[in-house]
Amino acid sequence: MFGLSELAVVLLVVAAVLAAKRLPELTRSMGKSARILKAESRALKDEPAPGEPRVVQGEAGARDAAGRPGPGGAAGA
């Protein structure tokens, strides 16, 4: 009868023939998934670490080097 290698070749040919119709859709889907993965990994890389203090720019919470509220600061204004 057939050996294991012949059976594998026949299965590969059948799979290629049946998958030829869906091949463009599959490659498009894989490309989209790769772009999403790349975007998410960039977003994670740009995100500050959980232990790092967040720096917020603005006048309302401005303080000088000694920790006192600066001009237009929130406390005592």
Image (cartoon, helix red, strand yellow):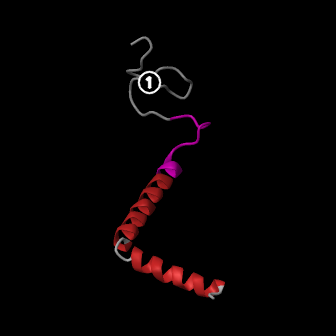
> Which of 29/48 is in front?
29
Looking at the picture, tell me which residue is in the foreground, 42 or 77. Answer: 42
Q: Quadrant of the C terminus?
A: top left
User: Which residues fall within the magenta stretch?
Assistant: 43-54
Q: Amino acid at mark 1?
A: Gly
User: How far across and down, in percent of the image, does residue 42 sit?
Assistant: 48, 54
Considering depth in this image, is 43 or 53 the residue closer to the camera? 43
Residue 43 % position (x, y): 47, 50
Residue at x 51% of width, y 80% of height: 12
Q: Main secondary structure of the magenta part?
A: loop
Q: Name the quadrant containing residue 17.
A: bottom left
Q: Is residue 62 above or below residue 11?
A: above
Q: Is residue 27 above or below residue 10?
A: above
Q: Within the magenta stretch, is there residue 53? A: yes
> Residue 73, relative to residue 25: is it above or below?
above
Quadrant of res 56: top left
Q: Residues within 10 Å of mark 1 (few under 14, many from 20)?
A: few
* Viewport quadrant of the N terminus: bottom right
* Residue 34 drawn at (x, y percent): 45, 62
Seen at 58% across and 82% down, the residue is 8
Tag 1 secondary structure: loop
Task: Name the side, left or right, on which 46 lies relative to 32.
Answer: right
Residue under label 1: 61
Is residue 54 shown above or below 39? Answer: above
Q: How many dots with numbers?
A: 1
